[in-house]
Image (cartoon, rainbow, N blue to C red):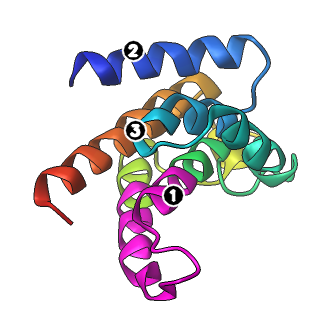
Amino acid sequence: MSSYTDDAVARALELHKAGYNCAQCVAVACAGKVDLDEDLAFRLMEGFGGGMGDFTQTCGAISGGVAILGMMNSGGMENPRTKASTYRLSSEVTARFTQMNGATLCGDLKGLTGGPVLRSCDGCIEDATRITLDVIERHAQSGK
């Protein structure tokens, strides 16, 4: 992995220690790669922490990565036809995260559903940040 990725992961983990939720950590740490204002990323992701409003559903770290990929890939309101390619990128992040951790639900990952703890929040933040930046890099290299 690149030094940029390592720095982004370190920053995301520092943000978590400072009180940001998992979605905010990933989105803010990756925002510079897609020319997204960090404060806007922070605000947009506020409700996604704790598995979407503390409902322990989809891991906030995944949500943060998916939001960044949408920002990168979307054609905006003028071109609503990019959603299929954005869905593919989002699917890749989710599939890779699942392969690494065995689940995508916050409650399952944190062991809140009766099973073992599969991954800590810091681990989820690290994985989602690395996967998201890898997808961005490969997307840039492919010219798409």
Q: Quadrant of residue 67?
A: bottom right
Under circle 3, the secondary element is helix
Could you tell me how far apart the alpha carbons at marks 1 and 3 are, in whole angstroms? 10 Å
Residue 21 versus residue 144 in the image, above or below? above
Under circle 1, the secondary element is helix
Q: Magenta residues?
A: 66-93
Residue 15 within the segment the image draws in magenta? no
| Res. 117 in view | no
Residue type, numbered disc 2: Asp
Q: CB atoms at circles 1 and 2 under 8 Å apart?
A: no
Could you tell me how far apart the alpha carbons at marks 1 and 2 are, in whole angstroms? 21 Å
Residue type, numbered disc 1: Met
In front: mark 2 or mark 3? 3
Residue 69 within the segment the image draws in magenta? yes
What residue is rendered at 23% in x and 56% in y? 139
Question: Where residue 117 sits: x, y (%)?
Answer: 63, 33
Dot placed on the residue nearer the N-terminal end, 1 or 2: 2
Residue marked by disc 2: 7
Identify the mark at residue 71; answer none if there is no mark.
Answer: 1
Q: In the rendered image, which quarter contains the N terminus?
A: top left
| Viewer-closest of 107 and 27 | 27
Question: Where residue 42 sits: x, y (%)?
Answer: 72, 37
Could you tell me how far apart the alpha carbons at marks 2 and 3 are, in whole angstroms? 13 Å
Identify the mark at residue 41; answer none if there is no mark.
Answer: none
Q: Residue furthest left?
A: 142
Dot placed on the residue nearer the N-terminal end, 1 or 3: 3
| Res. 43 in view | yes
Dot placed on the residue nearer the N-terminal end, 2 or 3: 2
Residue marked by disc 3: 33
